[in-house]
Image: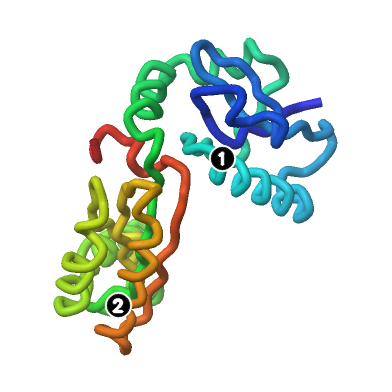
Amino acid sequence: MKSIAIGVHLRSEDIEPLAAATPAGALFVSAVPVPEDQSLSDRDLLVRISGVRAALLERATFIAIRYGFAFRSAAEAEAKCAQYAAKWKKLLEEHRHRVELTLRVAAAGSARPQRRDFQSGAEFLRALHSSARSARVDDAFRAAVEELIAPLCVKSHWAPRDEKSIELCGLIERSRLPNLSRAGQALKARCPHVPFLLSAPWPLEVFTDADHE
């Protein structure tokens, strides 16, 4: 039997009995046991893990682990986490009452490069990368986001998702989530012709990167 990790937590009581709590040094890994022969792409398994993940986040903030992280013993889980354990513990203590939010909006600017316009795959990939990096948000919409959404965040930054969309990533106190919902409605009213997706809460993921600390 293998276990599929969901997240890293400060306390075992933040996990049990929703999932198995596996010690990993001073931290705990939440996980779901899965038969060895079960495919990780199985739809029922994905739905099950998604539900557990959401329930865990309601209970306490945790650091998300990329789907597919599997282990078969506590020693293996601890070994895989050892390199990041000290950093993760510090982040969890600092951001225990915070969650992440995302606001995704369609990019304004040039169209997606077409493969037929390039002689090689390498040139096409470089063009895709350049297109994503040059993607921008409508100025009026960005100003509205900076006025309505960004001030609710402890930290926030814009990042290109691909050549078609840009995302504001934010770190917000849980207590301010009702304010975020109202701010989202105000943004929709102010910019009715700009489609966007505002979602929260999410576990810590983007803000575990040192580049955003």
Quarter holding the C terminus? top left
Residue 34 seen in this snapshot: yes
Measured along the vertical axis of the image, is residue 29 above or below residue 119? above
> Amino acid under label 1?
Arg
Residue 177 image position (x, y, % from top left): 39, 57
Residue sitting at 29 percent across and 76 percent down?
Answer: 187
Q: Left or right of 207: which side holds 142?
A: left
Measured along the vertical axis of the image, is residue 32 above or below residue 126? above
Quarter holding the N terminus? top right
Residue 9 image position (x, y, % from top left): 52, 27
Residue sitting at 50 percent across and 20 percent down?
Answer: 81
Between the residue at mark 1 and the residue at mark 2, the CA separation in whole angstroms equals 29 Å
Q: How many numbered badges does the structure rendering display? A: 2
Q: Left or right of 164: which side holds 63?
A: right
> Amino acid under label 2?
Ala
The numbered dot on residue 182 is none
- According to the picture, the residue beneath numbered tag 1 turns out to be 59
Report crowding for label 2: few under 14, some 14 to 19, many 20 or more residues within 10 A (C-alpha).
some
- According to the picture, the residue beneath numbered tag 2 turns out to be 186
Residue sitting at 25 percent across and 84 percent down?
Answer: 190
Report crowding for label 1: few under 14, some 14 to 19, many 20 or more residues within 10 A (C-alpha).
few
Q: Quadrant of residue 129?
A: bottom left
Residue 64 image position (x, y, % from top left): 50, 38
Residue 120 seen in this snapshot: no
Seen from the viewer's position, the closer of residues 115 and 2 is 2
Q: Left or right of 97: which side holds 10?
A: right
Residue sitting at 60 percent across and 15 percent down?
Answer: 23
